[in-house]
Amino acid sequence: MTKILKVSNLEKTYSSGSKKLTVLKDISFTVEEKETFAIVGPSGSGKTTLLGLCAGLDQPDHGAIELCGEEMDSLSEDERAILRNKKVGFVFQDFQLLPTLTALENVAVPLELLGAKNAEKAGKEWLEKVGLGDRLHHYPSQLSGGEQQRVALARAFSNDPEILFADEPTGNLDAETGEKVEKLLFELNTETGTTLVIVTHDIELAQKTGHILRLKGGKIIENTLTSQ
């Protein structure tokens, strides 16, 4: 199997006044292509920081990250942005839809910016796929939380990413809606063959993936394959 994400001896420290806070220490793991992978741990364990580093949104103080065959520390900020735009998808807890754009525009505009032909047609197809074919022209404020996250899923998968990072994708949803979004996330992932990395504190969600990495106090305390 091809390794799509390789993390080696990662460390990240933040300064708070005169004090230094080590958020991540000696983190090493790999994610295989097409794997479903969960990063779990309590609040403050470093999960979201780790996701940001893996996606090239921030840089570590020590260690190396290889994403989609690229050594991240050898890339400029612009080159990292290009890599993310072409090969990485994101789903966030707070949806991060643009409030002044309709559901369709939230999916189609990023595709247009990437130079995709028929971006609007593709956007419609993806929104139909997530069950929102009748909500194309609604703005985020006119959609429920579950509907907004489904728009976010359509947007994330629409550019055919090699890897998708989901940060607490059901964190702002009630249990019933969260289960529906989870089901849809895994269905779309299976259909597209995308590598899926989920950051979550929800162990039930994590157990639906094939691999669990557990953090505590910025360190790995467990790295195991599941029975999935």
Image (cartoon, rainbow, N blue to C red):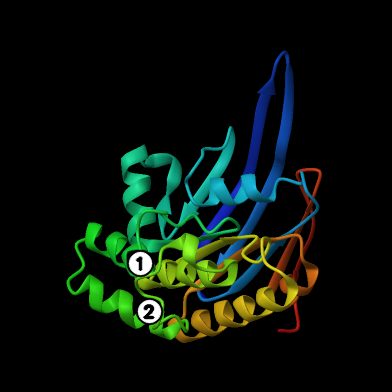
Instruction: Please state which amino acid type lies under the numbered disc 1.
Output: Val
Q: Quadrant of residue 9?
A: top right
The correct choice, above or below, for 141 with respect to 79 in the image is below
Which of these two is toward me, 29 or 109? 109
Tell me how far mark 1 sits from mark 2, CA to CA.
8 Å
State if disc 2 and disc 1 touch (CB < 8 Å): yes
Residue lying furthest top: 18
Which of these two is toward me, 172 or 161? 172
Tell me the crowding category of disc 2: few under 14, some 14 to 19, or many 20 or more residues within 10 angstroms, Cα based: many
The correct choice, above or below, for 46 with respect to 106 in the image is above
Task: Say which element carries label 1.
Answer: helix
Instruction: Please state which amino acid type lies under the numbered disc 2.
Output: Trp
- Residue 120, percent across and down? 24, 73
Q: Earlier in the sequence, mark 1 or mark 2?
A: 1
Work out whether residue 91 can be spotted. Answer: yes
Image quarter where the C terminus lies is: bottom right
Q: Residue at x 51, y 39 (%)?
A: 58
Q: Residue at x 54, y 51 (%)?
A: 54
Work out whether residue 209 can be spotted. Answer: no
- Residue 175, percent across and down? 74, 73
Residue 137 vs residue 212: left or right?
A: left
Q: Which mark is residue 107?
A: 1
Residue 216 vs residue 31: left or right?
A: right
Q: Which mark is residue 126?
A: 2
